[in-house]
Image (tube, grey):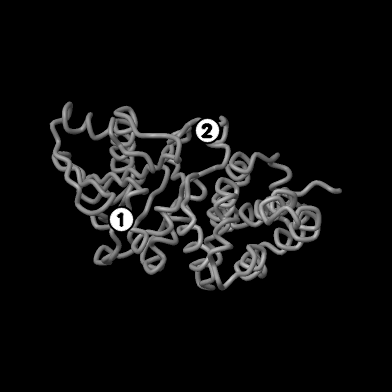
Amino acid sequence: MDNKRGSGKKDTLHWHLAFFDAIRLELFENLSDIEITFEYQLTSEPMRIDLLIVKKRKDVIINKNIACIFRGHNIIEYKSPDDSFSARDFLQVCAYANHYAANTPGVDDADLSLTFVGSRHPRALLQYLTEKRKYTAARSAPGIYLIEGHYIPIQIIESKRLPESESLWLKSLTNTLRVDSARAILEASTDNRLQMYFGAYLNILFRSNRKIFAEAKNMARRYPTLEEALSEIYPEEFPVFVQQSMEKGMEKGIEKGIEKGIEKGMERGIAAGKEIIIRNLLAEGMTVDEVARLAELPAARVRALKKGKASVRKPT
């Protein structure tokens, strides 16, 4: 519900797109059992749920720490790393939940759950819920607070506190990534089953943690250089990222280190990644206008991309 998403400096990296990927990676084993909708449109006005997860069968059990309270319809609100939740956010999400239940056939509040996900400690929100609302808040698992007293089950997830062994993707969705976490992501990203879900996620992490990923390559015995890791992770998805970064950027910066080389080649690499993300979002069913807004491109350019008649990159 971040109305300023993509329009201000705070969220120019489009963390919500990366969050969408992270959730799909976290719930990968159950993707056939659920339906995930990014920015679910409630009305014709700008009134959207960040993420809606609907179980396709009511008896499906999702064995994940972040999904213990899930019911049939699960509303998820996300804050990017530099933002935090407030009482206003809680009231808005509750209003959206009521609107969703009232206007979706076959759904009532007994079939809903609310989840708030952010990197920062939810101090203001917890204080509001416990002192003003008189609810109880208990840490049900590392990084997860279970809120009791509301008529809809609520959990607040402090992603940086999640165990990496259980929630690598959500925990790592930050601009303060640790080197060991970057290394774990590089290793996990070689799983071919997950390739289609990495577009926005890795794009955002690389751009916001460049130095950390450059340092991580020195720790990974499997990869003598970071560009070799990227070549393995993106054999098809990011050919321009790998080739152009090495040919144009590494050529001038190799003697000064991998970080400088990546920075030189990043512009074309990001363009290639952005094109893949756009095509994936269109394939997921998002409209041309929605994708154009998120990608910060003219709708005509996105429409041409959809038809395969254009590229994100400008001619050189």
The residue drawn where x is 80% and y is 55% is 248
> Tag count in the figure?
2
Of 205 and 289, which appears nearest the observer?
205
Location of residue 149 in the rendering, given as x and y in whole percent from the top left corner: 13, 39
Quarter of image, res 9: top right
Quarter of image, res 23: bottom left
Location of residue 58 in the rendering, given as x and y in whole percent from the top left corner: 26, 63
Residue type, mark 1 in image: Ile
The residue drawn where x is 28% and y is 38% is 98
The residue drawn where x is 65% and y is 51% is 274
SS assignment at label 2: helix
Horizontal side of residue 219 vs 292, given as left or right: left
The residue drawn where x is 52% and y is 48% is 17
Measure how far apart labels 2 and 1 are at the Cα level. Answer: 26 Å
Image vertical order of residue 162 relative to residue 62, above or below: above
Local crowd at mark 1 within 10 Å, few (<14), some, or many (≥20)?
many
Residue type, mark 2 in image: Lys
Identify the disc placed on residue 171.
none
Horizontal side of residue 145 vs 184, given as left or right: left
Q: Earlier in the sequence, mark 2 or mark 1?
A: 2
Image vertical order of residue 223 relative to residue 283, above or below: below
Identify the disc placed on residue 10.
2
Query: Which residue is label 1 attached to?
Result: 66
Local crowd at mark 2 within 10 Å, few (<14), some, or many (≥20)?
some
Name, please, the residue furthest toward the front: 255
Location of residue 43 in the rendering, given as x and y in whole percent from the top left corner: 43, 36
Quadrant where the N terminus sits is: top left
Image vertical order of residue 284 relative to residue 47, above or below: below
SS assignment at label 1: helix
